[in-house]
Image: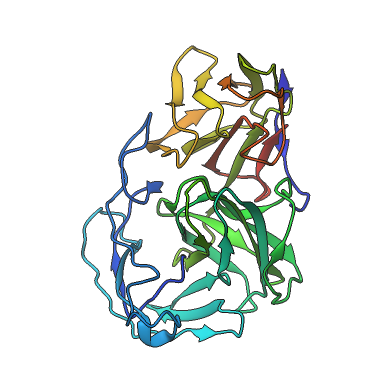
Amino acid sequence: MAHAQSSSGRGLLLLMLVALVAVTGGCFESSSQQGEGGGEGDERTLFGPGAGDGDGDRSPGDMEPRSMAFDDGSGDGSDDVTVVVDTVPFVRDDGSWVEVREFDGRTIVMLTTAPFELAPGEERFMCQNFANPVGRDLELSQTESVMTAGSHHLFAFTEGGAMDGPLSSCSGLEFGPSVHGASSIEKVITYPPGVARFLSGGDGIRIQMHYFNASDGFTEGQATVVLTESGDVEPLRAASLFMNNLNINVPAQAPGQATKTCTLPYDVQLLGVSSHMHRFGILFEATLDDGQLLYATERWEDPQPALFDPARSLRAGSTITFRCDYLNTSDRPLSFGESAETNEMCILSGVFYPSPDGQGIVCM
């Protein structure tokens, strides 16, 4: 049995925005549909490449509207706030975007990576650094990501002193403190009133993307991360739960299984969880020490999260056991690794509060 501990180490689409339509959100939201094993996320409409004037030049003039969940801080679940913000982002030479907007005394930050091309069957890990665009601490009531088709996961890591940098290849095994993560193409996390994710004024953002083009044609990778400031004063700190099984060994042309149990170091209110496997994964299950099913899915690609509203209360010393079932149809054994084509993973991730030190819980 592994003991989870607090982590203190490092570790879309071209959004064509003319307006932000702000509505109240829930606790922890999927961006489009019901999570497999838990509640429902609000439906939203997103717009991406190809929605502009058709000239393919990806200019601000090609921007289209989209709807976006937004917590107005009332906590009453009503759709009582609508705002339209004319927005023309700063477009850098490499096609990445940085945009900062103010609404009702709160800051909304949008970071969009440069686009990159993937050939049929190509797999790529790409990263891009962004300096903190406001230069001050932000308590975040909501984080959101949107990725183009072919994406497998995204992290928005926090990087001390990070400066704006070019898009570049990077390791898929990179990990550290983050303000957002996603295994689905669209994901929104909206925190309850009085709870927020923290971004230090001295930290920038490093967006890490994993893409695998399983189609027969060329495709383009790109991602946007949206960070919305909370209006709460001294909120409880939320953080990430990350449980990773490194002990995977599946023989060629055979089924296999990987199981791991982690112990929580302190009391948590769990807002939601999701899984991460690669293409040979056929079932993921997570259970609590009392036998209750926490999460289950048969999807290795674009798994939807389980959402808990109200949050699931878990006591210090309680355990979570998660299991991945595989069917290895290849002629080589499978072990833990970054490639969705030739390796496997078995990861349970989620979001919780309160975090005593603002850091996440990691069990590896």
Q: Residue at x 78, y 49 (%)?
A: 9
Image height of 7 relative to 66, above or below:
above
Q: Residue at x 68, y 48 (%)?
A: 357
Of the 4 image quadrants, the one containing the N terminus is top right
Say left or right for 79 vs 295.
left
Image height of 48 relative to 197, above or below:
below
Image height of 118 relative to 213, above or below:
below
The location of residue 177, given as percent across then percent down, is 69, 52
| Relative depth, front residue between 202 and 221 | 221
Q: Residue at x 72, y 61 (%)?
A: 169
| Relative depth, front residue between 271 and 305 | 305
Q: Residue at x 72, y 22 (%)?
A: 333
Q: Quadrant of residue 102?
A: bottom left
The location of residue 186, given as percent across then percent down, is 42, 53
The location of residue 240, given as percent across then percent down, is 59, 45
The location of residue 129, given as percent across then percent down, is 68, 69
Image height of 315 relative to 156, above or below:
above
Say left or right for 279 vs 187.
right
Residue 223 visible in this rendered orientation of the protein: yes
Of the 4 image quadrants, the one containing the C terminus is top right
Tally the numbered discs: 0
| Relative depth, front residue between 22 and 208 | 208
Residue 190 visible in this rendered orientation of the protein: no
Q: Residue furthest front?
A: 216
Q: Quadrant of residue 322?
A: top right
